[in-house]
Image (tube, rainbow, N blue to C red):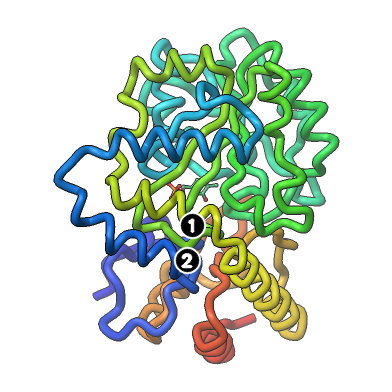
Amino acid sequence: TFPFNEFTPPYILPEKPLAILAWNENPYGFSPMALEAINESTSKANRYGWQDLMGLKKVIAEKEGVNPSNIMLGPGSTDLLERTSVYCFRDGGNVISADPAYMSVISVAQASGATWKAIKLTENYEHDLEGMELAMDKETKLVYIANPNNPTGSKTNRNDLYEFCAKVSKKAPVFVDEAYLEFSKNGLEDSMVDLVKKGKNVIISRTFSKIYGMAGMRCGYIVAHEDLITELSNFTIPGFGISSPTIIAAQVALDDKEHLHKCRTDILEYRDITIKYLITKNINYIPSEANFVIFEINMDGTKFTEEMYNSGIVIRTFKFWDKTWCRVTIGTDDEMRVFFNAMDKIYRK
Ligand code: PLP
């Protein structure tokens, strides 16, 4: 029997997986240069990786145009989202985010006793910044924005978001999760990191899991005011959770511009093909600037997931706005062909 439902992704893969399109991973793997570096680094892994960690932090600080004291590294950005949440909600309060949103920060906030104020995306699938600002009150301890958003893949206008963050960060910290920004039209140009440089109470997160194709290696970081980094450091020893081969690989991966370019180009090309497929089939979808696309299904989510699973394909389904949706990560040419074939059989109007 299929042991999952629409709220629990199938963590166990089908016997013969043909297309793993469930977690917004990069199907092309990580930089070949980084892979070589890992192989060499394992022989040094009897030692803690402090020196390499400091080296990586410095390189990232240069890339972001900030000081190393503005950077905190962690084993994936999830770890840092959760730690920030533990820190912000230790005395309760409320968190404001989009509806629907990526849930790491929110789940931990709720587990800490905080309440969640979910503000529905606008008709254009952007964050309802006005609505979010109106929802803020004295108990608001964090505003969380993923841009592009997950699970919708939609992006909020850069200038509107910039103005919003600059303004509301005077009242509460704003966490902008930029896990997918490299896949967006303007890429990192639309980052909010500039606000950190201006001393605003804004936290930016990035990850090596998406465009860098290193999801299983676990590495991510936040950029924030150094006082906040210092405060957060009381809740964790920064970076201690990252293995030393990962630290070494991440630094090399940052330099492999050719690989990054190839991943972006191929993923964006297949994102277009996926959208064209959905249009041809007259399926309602949300325009995406990430490495996944979400579309409406007129079927029970668990049943759809199960039928896909039995065809060797892992996708995710969601329920929001009284509709059921399938989110598909953009895979390789082979994977997407398998997916389109399965759609032709499984999807019912
Ligand atoms: N933020 C968003 C919006 C995500 O969708 C994800 C993963 O899917 C993450 C953060 C976490 O990524 P990681 O912990 O691998 O860095």
Q: Residue at image x 62%, y 8%?
A: 138
Q: Is residue 236 left or right of residue 172?
A: left
User: Which quadrant of the rendered structure holds the N terminus?
Assistant: bottom left
Quadrant in which residue 97 is drawn: top right
Find disc 1 in the rendering and name its residue.
253
Q: Which percent across, then down, holds residue 155?
A: 73, 49
Q: Name the amino acid, label 1.
A: Ala
Question: Of helix, strand and loop, which one carries label 1?
Answer: helix
Mark 1 close to ligand 1, CB under 8 Å: no
Q: Which percent across, then down, holds residue 333?
A: 57, 85
Q: Which percent across, then down, holds residue 42?
A: 22, 56
* Mark number displayed over residue 31: 2
Q: Give above or below for 152 relative to 291.
A: above
Q: Give above or below for 15 relative to 271.
A: below
Q: Residue at image x 30%, y 78%?
A: 14
Q: Residue at image x 55%, y 91%?
A: 341
Q: Is residue 213 left or right of residue 132?
A: left
Q: Is residue 5 left or right of residue 273?
A: left
Looking at this rendering, what residue extends furthest in the right direction?
A: 159
Using the rendered image of the protein, determine whether residue 117 is visible from the camera's viewpoint: no
User: Which quadrant of the rendered structure holds the C terminus?
Assistant: bottom right
Quadrant in which residue 5 is drawn: bottom left
Question: Of helix, strand and loop, which one carries label 2?
Answer: loop
Q: Name the amino acid, label 2.
A: Ser
Q: Which percent across, then down, holds residue 233?
A: 38, 19
How many other residues sit within 10 Å of disc 1, few (<14), some (14-19) or many (≥20)? many
